[in-house]
Image (cartoon, helix red, strand yellow):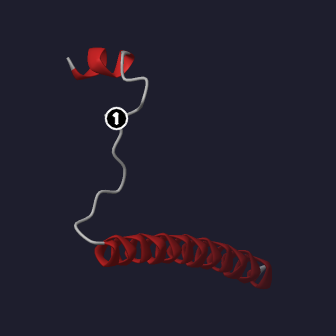
Amino acid sequence: MYGLARLFDLAALLDTYNESPTPAIADALAMYCDWASVGMDLEWALERELVEYLERQGSEAIEAGS
């Protein structure tokens, strides 16, 4: 029924985004989500750098042993 109602909702009255009890809570949630995203990006970058570092160390150890 909801999908059918959206077909006739030309004024977009059924659309709701980011509902929060107060603007302060909305800001706090947005800031939390932003920093969580930054944290995930940093984690990905650090993991990638660690993998590359370990690969370089392994190839240098193989070359030194030759």
**In the depicted structure, whether residue 6 falls above or below residue 58:** above
**In the depicted structure, whether residue 16 falls above or below residue 63:** above
**Could you tell me residue 28's position as x and y percent?**
35, 78
**Could you tell me residue 30's position as x and y percent?**
41, 70
Residue plotted at (55% across, 77% down): 42
**Could you tell me residue 60's position as x and y percent?**
75, 81
Residue plotted at (34% across, 35% down): 13
- Disc 1 residue crowd, few under 14, some 14–19, many 20+, Cα 10 Å: few
Of the pair 27 and 61, the residue shown nearer to us: 27
Of the pair 16 and 61, the residue shown nearer to us: 16
**Is residue 35 rendered to the left or right of residue 4?**
right
Instruction: Name the image quarter holding residue 7.
Output: top left
**Could you tell me residue 22's position as x and y percent?**
27, 71
Q: Which residue is mark 1?
A: 13
Label count reads 1
Quadrant where the N terminus lies?
A: top left
Quadrant where the C terminus lies?
A: bottom right
Q: Amino acid at mark 1?
A: Leu
Residue plotted at (31% across, 34% down): 14
**Is residue 35 rendered to the left or right of residue 54?**
left
**Is residue 62 rendered to the left or right of residue 13?**
right
Instruction: Name the image quarter holding residue 10.
Output: top left
Label 1 SS: loop
Of the pair 20 and 11, the residue shown nearer to us: 11
